[in-house]
Amino acid sequence: MSKKVFTVLLLAVFVLAQFSIASAAPVAGAEGTLVGPDFMPAGAASTVDFDWTATGLTNPTNIVMYARIQGGTYAIDECNLVATINGTSTGSGTFTYDFSVSANAAAPADGDYWEFTLVFDSTDTCGVSAPANPAAADNFLASSYVDGNDLDGYGFMPPYDGVVVTTPVACNTFEYWALASDSLGLAVPTDPYSGFGSWNAQVTGTFAPAPIGPESELLEWQFTLPSTASGNWAFEIDPEDAAGNVSGVGPYPFRFVAAIDPVEKEDCATFSDVSGHEYELYVRYLATLGLINGFADGTFGPDNTLTRAEASALIEISNGYDETSLPTSAPAGCDFTDVAASDWFSGWVWQACDDGFMNGVGGGLFDPNNLLTRGQIVTILNNVAESAVATSSFLNNGMLYGAFLIPTQLRDAAWSDVSIGAFYAEPVVEAYGWGIAEGTSDTTFSPDSPVTRGEFAKMLYRALSLFRFAF
């Protein structure tokens, strides 16, 4: 059940409840509004502002705001005066509810549901009886849940060779990224939560911060260090949810404060056709690390498709292999009838098969020249993450300690084109949930569509990113 539906049900319970009759004289024809936040933070020091408007009033009129915790049929705190403005006519303003004031109810606890009532009355009735029935025409309501659950998430450094030092950036253009969730571990929909608020990101250094992506549960922070960069620098975030809860342990650094190394200001490798492309950063960074290559004409072809044979080569390059270290004959279980020793890709295919990263398509075939699909690539990456890679490589130092192995996934999506039981079903869910891959829309993943070289580069970059911290 969604938060909105839950709110409606609680308000319905409130409206139908039998409250005591207020000893008050309602103001005929009065109109007003009371607007507050959907969620409040937990804790005794919390304050919450509610904006009000009032029309059609005559002096003397009390504008009174009451608060109560909803519990069961009746309020836990039947009448709790927030503030009173005496002798006021048409106007507007703000009432602030301060939970640290001893006269107010107990500090808001996680999961509480609070109801606030604005009453136009001739007398202040709190302490005498309950506020007038909220269904009455001269009362105006606002409601708020209490979210005391801190954000949970993970942050990742760019791909590196596994030696975590203070200067892990291979060249001047890179992406730091993170995932956050406010609902992890909650019994949704029973436990209300406010959702993501802000990354509160900042840069320590003698240069301007990079622009930050949308304030959502996935942070995509792309940055290019200028040639003039100098001194100590670090990236850090201190995520908070929409209710204002911050874990109190942060901020969390993507990079410890240390002097800029000359290599960090060197331009990343590039190709003639990637400038301005949405996957430019990933292509250039991985090319700098020697994990992907372009074509002889100086292009990379980010929008080109990949064959299964090409994918086997790219994966095993990340696994530390080159042409001199590949098998010269098919290992046991990898003797495909459509892969000959004379083929350029034979060693790559045999190695990928022997490592358990890629399998045949059945009937003794590997199908090397067929296009690699989006469902197949996330399955390959999942196979890599679940394999015990023995070589000292980017796969070993990246994936085995990286994004594809974080303890739990933080994002969920309902894919209309991913069938339960499909070989790629679980890898699709996990790759999206861990931030490795994106859908092609909010409801589609397009698992059977060919993956492009640019998409492959982004997925590989994310999969090789080193897990840095949990918050």
Image (spheres, rainbow, N blue to C red):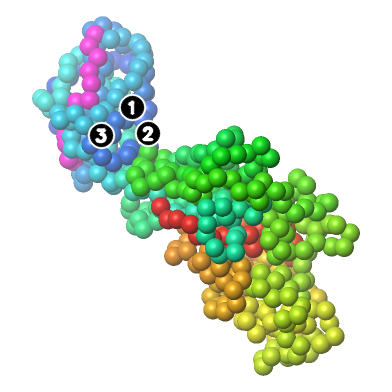
Q: Look at mark 3 in the image and give the residue it sits on.
A: 45
Q: Quadrant of residue 414?
A: bottom right
Left or right of residue 444, residue 344 in this image: right
Dot 1: few (<14), some (14–19), or many (≥20) neighbours within 10 Å? Answer: some
Q: Look at mark 1 in the image and give the residue it sits on.
A: 49
Q: Are marks 3 and 2 in contact (CB under 8 Å)?
A: no
Residue 140, position as x, y percentages in the image? 32, 26
Q: CA distance from mark 2 to mark 1?
A: 8 Å
Q: CA distance from mark 3 to mark 1?
A: 13 Å
Asked whether residue 84 is drawn in magenta, I would say yes
Q: Quadrant of residue 213?
A: top right
Which range of residues does the magenta coloring cover?
74-87
Please identify the residue farthest to the right as the structure is shown.
297
Disc 3 residue type (three-letter)? Ala
Q: Are marks 2 and 1 in contact (CB under 8 Å)?
A: yes
Please identify the residue farthest to the left as the structure is shown.
128
Camera-side mark, 3 or 1: 3
Left or right of residue 268, residue 35 in this image: left
Disc 2 residue type (three-letter)? Pro
